[in-house]
Structures are given as C-alpha cells and as structure tokens.
Amino acid sequence: MVAQAAGEVTPATGVGGLAWLLFALPAFGALVLFVGGRRTNAWGHFLGCLTVIAAFVVGFSIFLQTLGAGPEQRSSELKLFSWISTGALHVDFGLRLDPLSLTFVLLITGVGSLIHIYSMGYMSHDPGRRRFFAQLNLFVAAMLILVLGNNFVMLYLGWEGVGLASYLLIGFYQDRPSAATAAKKAFLMNRVGDVGLALAIFLLWLNLGTVQYSEVFARVGDLSPGTVLAICCLLLLGACGKSGQFPLQAWLPDAMEGPTPVSALIHAATMVTAGVYLVARCNPIYNVSADGRLIVCLIGTITLVIGAIIGCAYDDIKKVLAYSTVSQIGYMMLGVGLGPAGYALGLMHLLTHGFFKAGLFLGAGSVMHGMNDNVDMRHYGGLAKHMPITFATFGLGYLALIGFPFLSGYYSKDAIIEAAAAQPGWRGVVMGGLAMLAAGLTAFYMTRLVCMTFFGEKRWKNLKSPDGQDYHPHESPAVMTAPMVLLAVGSIGAGAFFFFDKRLATWLTPVVGELQEQEGHAVLSHSLVANGTLVLSALGVVVAYLLVGRRSVPVERPEPVSIPVRAARRDLYANAINETLIARPGTWLSRALVYVDNKGVDGIVNGIAALLGGSSGRLRRTQTGFVRSYAMSMLGGGVLLIAAMLAVRFGTQ
C-alpha cells in the first residue's frame, strides 16, 4: 500500500511554512553574486557558503518536525502562489514536504554545504571565484526546486534549471575549448532526455487533465496499460539523460572539464541523482507497470556494467571516478526498478554514494591541488606520505565504494545485488550475476587508482608540470580537508545507520511503500550472492595489486594491444555509435531539409516572383506614352475583334 497514491496531503504548518527559504536562500545568493559583479569579489564566496548552510539549517528543522509526526502526517504541501492559469490548465507554485523530498533536501544542502566550504580553499586563487559561487548557488537552488515541487511542471522547471547551471559550471573555464565542447555535449544530450520527460508530462495532462502529483498518483489506475508503459519509458528517457544512463551516458565523463568541486556536486549529491529521484517519486506509476519496471532494471544493469568496464581503462583520476559514478547510478536505477522490493534500497545507495563519492572527488581535487592540477595518475605515486589526511579520507571512501564489510557501500550496494538476484528465473541470474561482476570490476579499477596515486614509485620526481615547474605535493589546507573528514565519517557509518532496523525504509514508507522481500524461487541463493560478491570484490583487489601495486607503472601510457582494452579506452565506442546513429544522420537530414527549403520551397516562391517580375517588365515596354501608339493599338484590337466576329458568324452558316 503506497500512501502517496491516496493523494491526501495536509497544508504545511509550523516551520514547514518556511520551506520556501530552502530554494530562496541559494537563489538570493546567486542573484546577488551575478548582479553585484566585481563589487562582491571580496566576500561573495562567504555569501555563497552561508546561503547553502542556512538552507541546510531550515531543511534540518523541517526534517525534525516531520520526524516527530506520525507516518500518516508526514506528507504536507505549501502553496506559494498560482503560477499558470490558462484554460483548463492550472499549476500552482507549490512545495511538497514528505520523507522523500526532505531526504533529498538534507543530502543536497548537507553535502552541498561541505562542497561549498571546500571550494573556498580550492578556488581561492581563481579570478572567477565569485562567478563560480554564483553558479554553484544557482545549481543548488534549481535542484531544490526539482525535488520540492508538488507537480510535474515545477519538477520540469528545476530540471531545466539544473541543466542550465550544469552547462555553466562544466564550461566554467571559458578559455579552454575542451570545456566549451564538454558543456555543449552535456547540454545537448540532456535535451534528448528532457524531450522524453516533457512528452510524459504531456501524456499525463492529456489523459488525466492534471499535473499535480497527488491527483496523478491517485488516478493512475484510470490509464490504459499501453499509456502507462509509454509514460514509464518516457520518464525513464528523462532519467537517463540527467543520470547519465545508457544510452545517454557519454556526456557525464566529459563533464570533468569543470572545476573538481563541480564534479563532486554533480556526480555525488545532486544532478545525476535526479533520474533516480524521478523514478522513485513516480513509484505509483511504475507500480502498475511490470514491464516499465523491468525496462528500468535492464537499463540500470547495462549501465552499471558499462561504467565498470570503462573505469578500468582510464588514467585520468577524475574520469575513473566519473565512470564509477555512471556504474553506481546504474546500481541505483536497478534498485528502484525492482519496485517495492528495491525503492528504499536504491535510495539508500544514493545517500551512501553521496557521502563516499563526494569524498572521493574532493580527495581527487586535493591531489590535483598538490600536483599542479595534473590529473594523470601515471604521474603520481607515493603521495600517501605527502598527503596523509587526503590519503586517509580517500581510502575510506575507496573501501566504502568497493563494498568493504561494514562500511557504507557494503550495506547499500550489496543489498541491491541481493535483491536483484532474488528475482525469479532469468531476471535474477542476469541482473544479479552482472551486478556481482561489476562489483568485482569496481574493486579492480578503484584499487588500481589507489595504487597508482598513493603507493609505489614517486614518478613525479622526474617530471615537470605543464608550466615547467617541479612538483611539490603537499597536504591541502584545513578548509579543504575538514569537509573531506566529515564525508569520510559518512563513508564509514551512513550505511549501517540507514540499514539497521530498516531505518531508512521505514522513514520512506509513506512515499514508496513498505520494503517487500522478494517472494518466489530465485536461481541464485542469498548466501551464494552475498559470499560471491565479497569473493569477486576481493579478487578484483588482488588482481589490481598484482598488475599495478607490485609492478612499475610506466609514465607514458602504453598502446593497448587487445581489442577489449582498446574498446574500453574508447568508451566502448559510445561516442562513435552516437555519432554514427544520431549525429551524422541528423546532420545529413538537416542538410537535406535545407536543400529542399532553398531549392524547393524558396525556389517556388522565388520562381513565381521572377515570373511576375519578368512579365511585368515586358508588359511595361508597351507603355510608351505616345498617342499614336495607343491609337494604333486600339485600331489593331478593333480589327482583330471584327475579324473574330465575322469568322464566328460565317462559321456558323
């Protein structure tokens, strides 16, 4: 029984009436920093941090009030004003406060606050720091609107706002052509997914006459199975765009062109989790379509394998983590695709991933900070002694990610694998088996990253930075390491906190329903999956250590000799496939339409104009202005008219 489907919510009261401050505070910070310009350079970064921290305080206060209420009273709405009213369409600018939205509020503002604080140190010498914090505030405000809106149109507003802010942040370094290209790629590929989300909203409006969550979810049973499946697929397309899922995953690694704090914010706590939020929020729709849930599961499974394979082949520390994110979001999508058996599990992995992946990205930024922004792991080595805090916090995030027993990832990722394997028949074998394999690959590429970065020979000693300077790796300042330490605490204990007593699942029950154990006869037993996952992860660690930890790492990347390695280094040809199947045919179609427009449509219009112009020019020559010419014309016309009349008369006799 999903309480949300009943469509009954109460007006927000108490501190909940201040929920508008959640997005208004960072939006205000963005406005001041954008409009204030250079006059805010000296203190703009403080304003950017304080607005997000204040939003976290407001969100935590609302969370405590909601936590004190009974499960039936934990969903409320706050109408701010009437936004759109035209014909039969009425859309309020309103907020929905329930366990799901508040969970995301705490994640976005909590982890977002730490990333903002970290950015004060990371961007301290960047001349565009004020602009960076303005865009970062805009991003947080848009993401909060996305998760707080009480209807699909508000969700779409935040959805597009996040897309705009990510475009600005990915292309922050405007003097780099690669950054501009990456920003455009992310923007355009997200537009593909956004079309799917927009069409899903249109279908809901067409069939139900409303876009309000409470009304849509209460009446979803009125839709035909085909319509529900179409809506599920279109919603999933939107989720694939934002969350970098197959086949729209190619933009996400390129987003590493932005500053590292952007990578932490986009890839850990906010933008890429929007797709998971969308599926979880629309759980009443997916609950009535088994085929829709299966498609979500298959997309998640394919993506988690793709991300894990490609992550094994890169030497760029940020791109390894980016493909790790692609893979981990795939686990989340697999979880929420399982329906009532996995909604809470997917969201739990989303939360734990927010801690350890944000910590990993910030750790990567700390390494770059000490290595003159070099991202090539082949130029690292032996950094553990020079960056002890970074190494410790990064190491805890690494262990949590690979599912080391009793750390966060062990409780969240392994739970999804076990739930997937518990599906009956071929579904459990395929989805569970591939998820286990990806867990082993995750352990391999992350161990490879740690060995190349923190252990082994100090390869940077014999190298020069791009600006010709020697490398002098050093620990980052406290303003950067303090957030990393706090995130490391989450990497250690967040999973256990959410898992025991089904604490998170119970909290989310009013929205996604009770966590259901899979019934049926699974091919893979629970013990086989649990132990097999641990064995494969351990095997991945051992293989990576033998191949990288115990061998000398060449500074220059050797050319791959095997086809699988070449394919992985080329992103499994995802960009080539998109270019061949979408970009080039689209270019050819555009050129053909332009040719038809120029030679066809414009040709007809221009031809008619030329015909009339030429004819009028020739007729104009008969107008001489001489009376004798007009008299001769009249005489000739009269003669011809008389001749015609005579011909007709005599012809009829």
Image: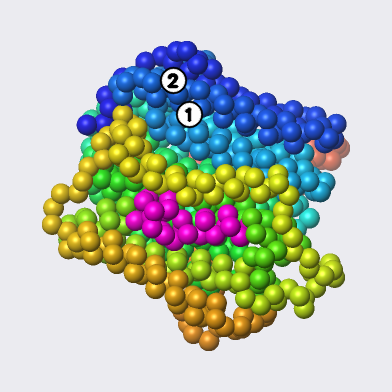
- Taking depth in this image into account, of 320 and 395 the one nearest to the observer is 395
Which residue ends up furthest to the bottom in the rendered image?
561
Q: Let me know if residue 396 is in the magenta part.
A: yes
Of badges 1 and 2, the one in the foreground is 2
Q: Is residue 511 above or below residue 89?
A: below
Q: Which residue is mark 1?
A: 148
Who's the residue at 68% across and 60% down the image?
387
Coordinates of residue 615 in the picture (x, y in percent): 70, 47
Coordinates of residue 159 in the picture (x, y in percent): 52, 38
Quadrant into which the C terminus falls: top left
Coordinates of residue 317 in the picture (x, y in percent): 61, 64
Q: Is residue 256 above or below residue 98?
A: below
- Taking depth in this image into account, of 500 and 153 the one nearest to the observer is 500
Residue 267's disc number: none
- Taking depth in this image into account, of 551 and 49 the one nearest to the observer is 551
Residue 65's disc number: 2
> Badge 2 local density, few (<14 within 10 Å), some, or many (20+)?
some
Q: Is residue 26 left or right of residue 348?
A: right
Say how the picture is coloured. Answer: rainbow
Magenta residues span 390-414
Q: Is residue 62 left or right of residue 452?
A: left
